């Protein structure tokens, strides 16, 4: 398996523009997670899905952020409108079973977002 | 709310040294404690997972311990190598979520 795939790897945009990040989880994994990593706050969970259904979005910072998972092999994280403080590395991860069992999460390479 | 702290924030050692990275967590009601490695520009790779009923896990030169009662975990790296240079993150697994520490940035010089 190719692992978790994210695109784009780098994104530079101007404030106010819409940004869409994409993720393809590992085949057969039922759970998908979106994280954000910054120097100030470290790695934070934004939202996670189970079988394409959003389970917990309490980490989503504002209404400007939205996430979808239309099928088992694809998810998007959208920021509209983007702001400079959204600049961060966004990671997608997937797992076969929910954290709490013996399973771990497998992370993608991340998307480095810079909002000017 | 679970809070995870890692010390030191950065560590620089010469090749061959044994070293210890520390992780502390505030809520002992965890399912497991995981250690990840992050290389620059890349995602996280799981190194070791210690279930709440276990005291330690070993993989090669890595050994991780867990003391739930004191809210602490340590990652021991034996005979460090330049290839070990990376950021090491611990994560406490509670109900449905991983809570990460801010990491220890390790540099092993030849």
Image: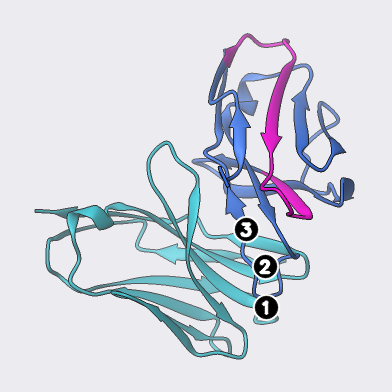
Q: Using the image, tell me which numbered label, if any, was put on residue B2.
A: 2
Magenta highlight range: A12-34
Pointer 3 local density, CA inside 10 Å: few below 14, some 14–19, many at least 20 = many
Pointer 1 local density, CA inside 10 Å: few below 14, some 14–19, many at least 20 = many
Asked if disc 1 and disc 2 are in contact, CB closer than 8 Å, the reply is yes
Tint of chain B:
cyan
Q: Residue A23 at x, y = what percent? A: 68, 35
Which residue is drawn at the image coordinates 53% and 42% (left, top)? A40
Mark 1 vs mark 2, CA separation in Å:
9 Å
Residue bearing mark 1: B30
Secondary structure under tag 1 reads loop
Classify the position of the N terminus of chain B by image quarter.
Answer: bottom right
Mark 1 vs mark 3, CA separation in Å:
16 Å
Tint of chain A:
blue
Q: Residue B105 at x, y = what percent? A: 34, 53
B30 lies left or right of A87: right
């Amino acid at each position: 398996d190719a692992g978790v795939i994210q695109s784009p790897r780098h994104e530079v945009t101007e404030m106010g523009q819409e940004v869409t990040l994409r993720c393809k989880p590992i085949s057969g994994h039922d759970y998908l997670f979106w994280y954000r990593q910054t120097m100030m706050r470290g790695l934070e969970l934004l939202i996670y899905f189970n079988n394409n259904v959003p389970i917990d979005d309490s980490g989503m910072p504002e209404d400007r952020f939205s996430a979808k998972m239309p099928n088992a092999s694809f998810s998007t994280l959208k920021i509209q409108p983007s702001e400079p403080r959204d600049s961060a590395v966004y990671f997608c991860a997937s797992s076969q079973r929910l954290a709490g069992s013996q399973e771990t999460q497998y992370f993608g390479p991340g998307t480095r977002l810079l909002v000017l | 709310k679970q809070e995870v702290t890692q010390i030191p924030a950065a560590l620089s050692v010469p090749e061959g040294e044994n070293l210890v990275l520390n992780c502390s967590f505030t809520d002992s009601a965890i399912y497991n404690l995981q250690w990840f490695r992050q290389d620059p520009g890349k995602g996280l790779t799981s190194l070791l997972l210690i279930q709440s009923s276990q005291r330690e896990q070993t993989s090669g030169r890595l050994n991780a311990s867990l003391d739930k009662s004191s809210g602490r975990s340590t990652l021991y790296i034996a005979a460090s190598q330049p290839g070990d240079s990376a950021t090491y993150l611990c994560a406490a697994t509670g109900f449905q979520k991983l809570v990460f520490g801010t990491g220890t940035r390790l540099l092993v010089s030849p």
